[in-house]
Every structure is written in C-alpha cells, then in structure tokens.
Amino acid sequence: MKVFWRFFKYLKPYIKPLAAANFFMLLFVIFSLASIGLVMPFIDLLFNQSPDQITTEVSFSILNLKEWLSYQLNEFVQSYSKLQLVTYLCILIIVVFLFKNLFSYLQTWFMSFVEQGIIRDIRLQLYTHFHKLSLSYFTEEKKGILISRIINDVQIIKDSMIAVINSLFRDPPLIIIFSAVLFIFNWKLTLLVFALIPVTGFVLAKIGNSLKKRSIRSQERIADITSILDETFGAMRIVKAFGMEEYEIKRFREEEKKYFRLLTSLIRRRALASPITEFFGVITITIILYFIGSQIVLGESDMTPGAFFVFLGIFFQMMPSIKLVGQVFNSIQEGIAASERVFSILDTTPKIVDAPDAIDLKSFNKGIQFHNVSFKYEKSDLILNKINLEINKGEVLAIVGPSGAGKSSLVDLIPRFYDVIDGSILIDGIDIRNITIKSLRSFIGVVTQETILFNDTVKSNIAYGLQDLSRDKIIAAAKAANAHNFIENLKDGYETVIGDRGTKLSGGERQRLSIARALLKNPPILILDEATSSLDTESEVLVQQAIERLMTGRTSIVIAHRLSTVQSANKIIVLSDGEIVEEGTHEVLLGKLGLYHKLYNMQFKFDEK
C-alpha cells in the first residue's frame, strides 16, 4: 500500500486545479441535494398536502433543524397561491439543474487537466529514468515489457489515483451531506440503513485482494504480448524469408489466449463489486419502504408524500457514490500491483554514474591505456582477463580474433557503456571513472556493424545530437561519407523520411549515413565495430573509402571482420578467450605463424573461392 501512496506526490503541481475541481464538485453535491429537495413541495402541492402548520416561530438549532425547516417551508407556502408556487418551483427546478450540470462540467474541466498531467509526468519520469540506466539493464530486460510498463501500468496507476481522489473529495462530501439530511428526516431508520454498509465493505475487500493478484498476472501477460509484437515487427523480413508467418501467428494466439482468460477473469471479479453493492442497496431500500410504508398505512408517520419521495430520492442519489466507494477498494489493489512494477524500475539504480568528484575531459593529448582490465557481464563468465594495452594518440589500432573472443566488449568499455570489474582504463593518465560521462562520450564517435537510424529525415539522422547546424556542413559530411549522391536521388533529398531503423535504405546506404553522422560529430577518438561486414563489394568499397576519410587525424580503434582492411593499422592485437595472445603489425603477426596467421590464411582461402 505504501508504494501506491508514493505516487500522490505527483499531485503537488496540480493543487490549484485540483482544489477548483473539488470546489465545483462540492457545489454539484449541494445543487444535487437541492434538485431532489425541490420535489418535496412540488409533490405536496399536487397531492394537496402541506407541511405541519407551525404558527409559532422556530429558532434555528441543530436539535430542532427539522422543525425549523418545516416552519420556513410553511412560511414560504403561505406567501403565495398554489398556481404561483407551481410556476416558481418549475422555474427554480430549471435553474437548479442548470447550475448542477454546469458545476459538473467545470469539475470535469479542471479534473481532466489533473488526470492527464499526472499520467504525463509519470511517463516522462519513467522515460527519463530509462535513459539514465546502464546498457546492461536493457540487455537483461525485454523491450516489450518496458514498453508495457510505461504505457499500461502508468494508465492503471492514474486510474487508481483518480478513483482515490474522487472517493476522497467527491463521494464523502456527497454521502455526508445526504446522510445528514436523511438523519433529519428519520434518524432511527437511517442508523439501521447504515448498519449494512460494513457488511458490503467486507465483501468488497475480499474481492479486491483477489483482483490484485490477477492484475499482476494480466500486466505480465500484456507485457509478453507487447514483447512479441516488438520482436515480430522488427524481424518481419526474416519471418517472411523463413516462411514463419503461421508459427508467429500461433505464438501470438497462444499468448493472447492466456491474456484473454486472465483478463476475462479479472473483469468478472471486478464486476462483482457493482451488483453486490446494488443488492445491499436494494435490501436497504426495501427496509425503508417497509418501515415508512407501515407507518404511513398505520397513520404513525409524520412524513408527507413529498418528504417520503425526497427520502427515497436522496438514498438513490447516494447509491452510485456508495458503489464507487466500494469499487475504489478494487481499483487501489490494481494500482498497488502496477505501482510495484513501475517503482521497481524507478528504484533501479544506474550502474554507470559520474563519480562525486568527476571532472570534465577538456582535451585529448596522449592516448588510452588499459591496465590489468578484467570484465564480465552480470550473468556471464569472465569475458576479458587482465588486458594490458596502450593506444597512442593518432594511432590506428585493429582488434581481431574469433567470434566470442571479447572484441566488442573491449571497445564498449572505453565510452563506459559498461565498467570494468578489475583494473582501470585511462585517458591521458586519468581514470575514465573520474571523468564525467557526458564529456567522455563527447570525445568518442562510434560506428557499429548494426546501423542505428531513426524514423526521421536524412538530415536529422546525420545531424543527430547536434543543434543549429547549417545545411552546408551536413552536405559536406555526407559527401565525405560517399552518401551525398544517393541522398540527392531520394524522393525528397535530405528531407526524405527513411523509415523505422532506415528500412527504406540499403545496408551500404545506412552505413554511410552513420559514418556521415560520426564525421559531423568530429570526435578525436573513433570506434569502428565491424563497420564493413555484411556489405556487398561495391558498398564495401564506398564505405571503406568513407571510413578512411573518417579515420584521418583521429585515434581509431577498429574491430576487423575482414583482415584485409586492417593491414595498414599501426598496431593489431589478437584476442582469444578474453586475452591478448598476439600483438604487432600485419607483417610481424604473419611472421609469428600464430592465430593471426591462421585466421588470415583461412580468410584468404575463403576469398579465393
């Protein structure tokens, strides 16, 4: 329960509209009561009834409130003819209902701002926190589950919060005011009626507990469904290429069937609250009808027909509020379940953070050093073991080795996508953990094998992360990346939207855009992670030319898939099982007749074929 109440801090910026909404809700309650109260004199007039004739003036007090109201009504009735009273009452009824509905609308008008503001703020904080989390978090969690948390769970929390707010500010005033009026009419009967409410509350609490469990499972299911959708849409080319449409449909159908059963059960349980509340309400109304009816038949009741109808009318008006008070127990249980899932994310501490005394990196003058660096992922064996390496400024370092040797893990440590578990990485003699992350990464450009582009224009993708760049600079970067010609041939040139992840472009075109993006950033340190793999020969030539321009004057770290592309590197290291087993230039390593020689010959024979 405590975790759910944490979300009420989001109400703080909306105190004024919330106060306005509740003020108009209070006016709505008052005019609702007035709209019912006007029925009493109208019915009494039609049935030629009148309140008790009280000739002696009655002073106002809580103890004789009923007598005072009767006296005031009698004075009013005696002042006009019956035809005048009917006319005035009809006009008054129209006015009262006009204001009642006006105040209802104004309450909704202000409350909508509060509701949507809360959901916007929670989602924004959650999305902002996602960006603070380390890459390791996203390797452990499914994207679909995270999307479900930010869309579905936040919606449930908002609905629960608003239900609680309404139950606090709308329903209690209505119930209290209406109950006070009922007590004035017949306090003994009202006490008997309200004795049934705890029984209803007990039953609803039991339903709420089971709802919480089902709500947790239902949100887990919708997260699984979202994850399947994300995976399938992202791999639609592969699905169709392997003829797996029926398999994916079957997989989705199975998950949807589980969600269907669970959600059906949840809705059925949730729906129990309303009929149970209504059934107890019918019992209560039956009691009212029996006791008052018996008294009227026996001539023992002091109620006029109008008063009797008002008593019933007030109780009927209270029923929806009493129902909602009951349903709020269920809503809170669902909100608690969703809150636990959302706060499990918000309470996750980023693993890669700035040290308290971190400094900004102002320049890059000497080089990068690895001192006894060891690394492993959270749920893996040791990936890198005791790596010692020095990369001088302006050098081109190539990293080669078999798959799984730890090449990508090694370069991911430099921009602190992950932190070492032992040893240290230094830039110009400063441990990178003592450098602010933002300034460190501003010195590093990354071009990966998997090109990451956004569903935006060509221009926006090239200029990603940079503000107020002139079109000439963007075009210059595109030309240097051998991308300008194909961009000009696109339908809208640099304003062409390239689709999700750049699906409207070929692999070589996407890679050249990512190189143009890196060129525009103009970083002194460049990381190229197998940037030319999986390309056709023509595209590889164009990309390789762009890469050579990109590396000019920079410290470059290249993970090489094709060894022919790194022969001119100043230094080549060979990784195997997380350790550097060989180091030197291309000629030196070939002469050692070791792993590099073996990999080179294997690739040379493959290329000949």
Image (spheres, grey):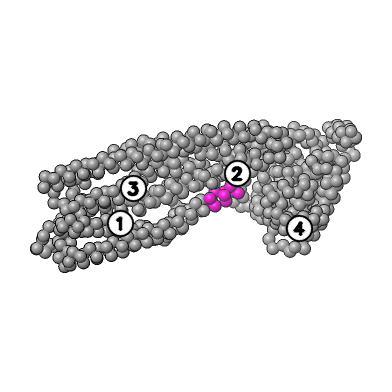
Distance from the alpha carbon under mark 2 to that under mark 4: 41 Å
Label 3 residue SS = helix
Q: Secondary structure at mark 1?
A: helix
Toward the left, the furthest residue is: 56
Q: Amino acid at mark 3?
A: Pro
Rounded to the nearest angstrom, the CA distance separating label 2 from label 3 is 49 Å
Mark 2 or mark 4, earlier in chain? 2
Pointer 2 with pointer 4, Cβ within 8 A: no
Disc 1: CA contacts within 10 A as few (<14), some (14-19) or many (>=20): many
Image x and y of residue 46, in percent? 19, 57
The numbered mark, 3 or 4, whose residue comes first in the sequence reads 3
Q: Which residue is mark 3?
A: 320
Whether residue 571 is visible here, answered yes or no, is no
Label 2: element kind = loop
Nearer mark to the viewer, of 2 and 4? 4
Amino acid carrying mark 2 in the image: Lys
Q: Nearer the viewer, residue 365 or 245?
A: 245
In the rendered view, would you say 188 is above or below 266? below
Q: Nearer the viewer, mark 2 or mark 3?
A: 3
* Range shown magenta: 123-132
In the rendered structure, which disc, 4 or 1, sits on the residue that comes first in sequence?
1
User: Residue, x 30% and y 39% (percent of image)?
Assistant: 279
- Provide the residue designation for mark 2: 351
Q: Position of residue 586 (x, y in %)?
A: 87, 40
For label 4, the residue is 493
**Is most of the magenta stretch helix, strand or loop?**
helix
Per the image, the residue denoted by label 1 is 32
